[in-house]
Image (cartoon, grey):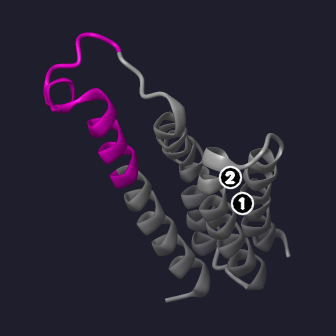
Amino acid sequence: MTSDLWALLAALVLASFQLTIASVLTLRQLGGTWVAGPRDEQREVTGISGRFVRAHRNLLEIFPQFAAALFLVHEAHAAGSLSAVGGWLFVIARLVYVPAYAFAPPGVRPICWLSAWLGIVLIVADVFV
């Protein structure tokens, strides 16, 4: 398996880990009755718990572009060093994004997001090199 596909696997593990954290924190804050119920009443987690939930949602928003970029580069038989660097840049930036969202001062989170996006750009760049 290529390095960029290992990065995809790492991103899947990160997404699963973030989902677990978000679920546990939601359960702790909103209670089992609401979590297990039909959720007709809209409720949002707040504070640090809400930040972890929103960080997970943000990963779900950008993950399809990451996976599509890897699919594109592999279908074009163009996977190389740029896609490997880009894949791991994405994973590391998204890994750092989680505590940055929860605890860092303003400005750190957008840098992490931009770094992950740059990783996607690097992956796609392998098609043109």
Q: Quadrant of residue 94?
A: bottom right
Q: Is residue 124 left or right of residue 3?
A: right
Give the residue at x 82% y 52%.
111
Q: Is residue 54 left or right of residue 122?
A: left
Give the residue at mark 1. Answer: 120
Q: Amino acid at mark 2?
A: Ala
Give the residue at mark 2. Answer: 100
- In the displayed structure, 67 sits above or below 44; it is below
Where residue 18 sits: x, y (%)?
A: 44, 54
Disc 1 on helix, strand or loop? helix
Q: Residues within 10 Å of mark 2 (few under 14, many from 20)?
A: many
What separation in Å lies between label 2 and label 1 (alpha carbons)?
A: 20 Å
* Range drawn in magenta: 20-42
Kindly report which numbered mark, 2 or 1, lies closer to the viewer in this rendering.
Answer: 2
Numbered circle sitting on residue 26? none
- In the displayed structure, 21 sits above or below 50; it is below
Give the residue at x 34% y 36%.
26
